Amino acid sequence: MADKTILVAGTWDTKDDELGYLVQVIRAQGGDVLTMDVSVLGDPSRPAHVSKHEVAEAGGASIAEAIAAGDENQAMQIMARGAAAKALALWRAGRIDGVIVLGGTMGTDLALDLCAALPVGVPKYVVSTVAFSPLLPPDRLAADIQMILWAGGLYGLNSVCKASLSQAAGAVLGAARAVELPKRDRPLIGMTSFGKTVLRYMVTLKPALEARGFEVAVFHATGMGGRAFESLAGEGAFAAVMDFAPQEVANHLFGGLSAGADRMTNAGRAGIPQLVAPGCYDLVDFVGWQDTPPKLAGRPTHAHNRLLTSAVLEAGERRQVARALCAKLAEATAPVAFLLPEQGCNEWDRAGAPLSDPEGLRAFVDEIARACPANVALHRLDAHINDTAFTDAALAIFDGWIATGVVARPA
């Protein structure tokens, strides 16, 4: 008897052989399959478990309307909406344990929406002719999406593409069998940070919060980490957040490694209490092996490694970041505390350190004080973000929230 069921989705009218091969491999390994057809014009050689008509209806239209649109992009967006809705419904009903989607650019476009609709922890694999391509914007990638290049498989089966297809089929079934889905036995704190060379508060805060009965997940705020953080915040997965490295907001403003336009918004929309600090607000990260973006040329930089370089923002740009942070927090529907360390916000900007800019720091601090919205409690600290005084202040505010019921006390 099959132990796990995998949703196999794609355009069965044009990729019948390839999708059928995925089904064959999954079943040969003892798994079960549900098939979803996202075709528009043609039909599969055998009926899919979820027909294209069901998919289109879930996307708010019909196949006839998709065809009548006369535009393949519009038609596939209908199917993408429907595929995402149907996949999520199947997951919530306990009918699938993972998903694999196959496609070229059309199928991959749809696959990104389908995978983004599923919660973190659900195995989600995409076999694509454009895997790892710059065509794929980070803000459309599900936090834990897996991809493999569909090499040599644009049209028809062959031994080259079977290597990719069989790996993907085995990987998604293996992941469905092995995955330990996120538990909800302890309230979860979401924290953002970078490595200990630049931000250190997590070393103190994580064990202190765990001693209070919370689970702590620390997200590396370099684009995809922020996407994962925002995805879980949007699901309401956190009891509270400590968003102490919102640098991805500056990245989005100045062309760095963005986590999307909704960075630093989903916790507020979900009514999750937020402790916020501006860790690395003054830096914009970009791909180290590429040329410096024109917006960031001519200023100090720090090469963190061969992958990642950070450029230092000027005083006026730091004021712009301050206003952006405050505007996002103004929309929050739950308590927000903003900790503002006035001696610096990353290890490289301490007095005398290579990226120290006292004038820029003063400009940022002044702008935060001026623009801080009424719904945000501003705590100005005569300390650096990596000082003990910062973590002491964060824990004091958090303990006050527990005492007053803003954050529920762990059972």
Image: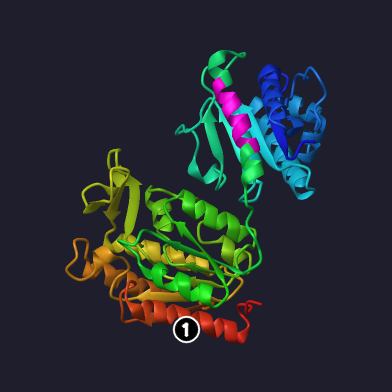
Say above or below: 206 vs 246: below
Look at 34% across and 46% down and name the residue there.
286
Look at 39% across and 68% down and name the residue there.
203
Going by the image, does 277 lie left or right of 345?
Answer: right
Going by the image, does 382 lie left or right of 262?
Answer: left
User: In this view, which residue lies farthest toward the left?
Assistant: 352
Q: Which residue is mark 1?
A: 396
Whether the magenta-drawn stretch holds residue 171 is answered as: yes
| The N terminus lies in quadrant | top right
Whether the magenta-drawn stretch holds residue 183 is answered as: no
Amino acid at dot 1: Ala
Say above or below: 13 vs 285: above
Going by the image, does 116 lie left or right of 373?
Answer: right
| The C terminus lies in quadrant | bottom right
The percent position of residue 216, horizontal first and vertical second, equals 52, 66
Among the 4 quarters of the image, the one containing residue 321: bottom left
Is most of the magenta stretch helix, strand or loop?
helix
Going by the image, does 206 lie left or right of 101?
Answer: left
Look at 49% across and 73% down and name the residue there.
275
Few, some or many C-alpha atoms within 10 Å of disc 1 (few <14, some 14-19, many ≥20)? few
The percent position of residue 279, horizontal first and vertical second, equals 37, 65
Q: Which residues are magenta?
A: 163-173
